[in-house]
Image (spheres, rainbow, N blue to C red):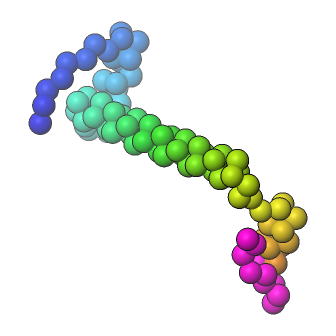
Amino acid sequence: MNITSIRIPEEMEKPLESLSKKLDRSKSYLINQAIKEFIARQSLEESRWQDTLQALESIKSGNSIDEEDVNAWLNSWGTDKRLSTPK
């Protein structure tokens, strides 16, 4: 495992220390968890952004489904006459 130094603002040190004691975990553990969650969130946001760009390109290419068709399909869920997926 690599070692990286960080500077923590004074106003974060006390809450971090308190949380560390409360959870019986080291400050290093808590910081690593926070970084891991931040990286996962950033990765998810990037993935969603790429999905959005792909969807926009699809729409520009004329690939879309009429709202009424989608609503009719969704409204058919849970009924005896479920419609097939609109295309």
Residue extending furthest toward the right: 68
Q: Residue at x 83, y 62 (%)?
A: 66
Q: Classify 77 as above or below 52.
A: below
Q: Is residue 20 visible?
A: no
Seen in the image, is 42 located left or right of residue 83? left
Q: Main secondary structure of the magenta part?
A: loop
Residue 8 location in percent, x, y?
32, 15
Residue 10 location in percent, x, y?
36, 9
Q: Residue at x 82, y 78 (%)?
A: 76
Q: Residue at x 37, y 37 (%)?
A: 39
Q: Classify 20 as above or below 59.
A: above
Query: If the image is split into quadrants, where does the C terminus sit?
Result: bottom right
Does the magenta run of residues contain 38?
no
Q: Is residue 49 visible?
A: yes
Relative depth, front residue between 18 and 48: 48
Residue 25 location in percent, x, y?
25, 37
Does the magenta run of residues contain 82?
yes
Residue 85 location in percent, x, y?
72, 75
